[in-house]
Image (cartoon, rainbow, N blue to C red):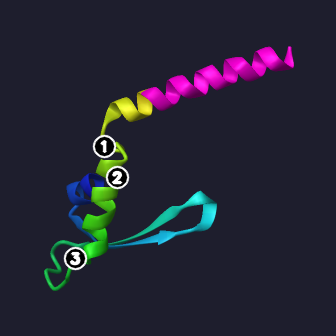
Amino acid sequence: MKKCFSTHGFIIFNVEEISTHGGSLRIYVKDVKNNEFLVNSSVERIIKKEIECGLTDISTYTNFGEKIKKIKKQLRNFLI
């Protein structure tokens, strides 16, 4: 999200973790032209958490996709 917003001239200045739907993020952004803002420490904390969980690595998503295919196959075989 940070890269997407910055490409269009916005900066993420605050993030809240929301417990709904198994965990969601509420992201607050501002136009970079308005330079009167403070970036909350929550932004770096969430980015660090994402890096630690491997969410910035494409292999995380590739592996997840493979696991889903395996589960689908197992479920289909079970139902048959």
Q: Mark 2: give few (<14), some (14-19) or many (20+) Cα within 10 Å.
A: few
Instruction: Identify which residue is drawn at 25% across, 65% down.
Output: 44
Magenta-tinted stretch: 63-80
Instruction: Identify which residue is drawn at 57% across, 68% down.
Output: 19
Q: Mark 3: give few (<14), some (14-19) or many (20+) Cα within 10 Å.
A: few
Q: Amino acid at mark 2?
A: Glu
Image quarter hosting the C terminus:
top right
**Hey, which residue is sitting farthest front in the picture?**
52
Q: x%, y% of residue 20?
A: 61, 66
Instruction: Identify which residue is drawn at 60% across, 58% down.
Output: 22
Q: x%, y% of residue 77?
A: 78, 14
Decide whether residue 36 is among the magenta residues. Answer: no
Q: CA distance from mark 3 to mark 1?
A: 21 Å
Q: How many marks?
A: 3
Q: Is residue 75 above or below residue 17?
A: above
Image quarter hosting the N terminus:
bottom left
Q: Is residue 35 above or below residue 51?
A: below
Q: CA distance from mark 2 to mark 1?
A: 7 Å
Instruction: Identify the residue position indicated by label 1 in the image.
Output: 56
Instruction: Identify the residue position indicated by label 3 in the image.
Output: 39
Q: Amino acid at mark 1?
A: Thr
Decide whether residue 72 is among the magenta residues. Answer: yes
Q: Secondary structure at mark 2?
A: helix
Q: Is residue 78 left or right of residue 10?
A: right
Q: Amino acid at mark 3?
A: Val
Instruction: Identify the residue position indicated by label 2 in the image.
Output: 50
Of the numbered discs 2 and 1, the one sitting upstream in the chain is 2
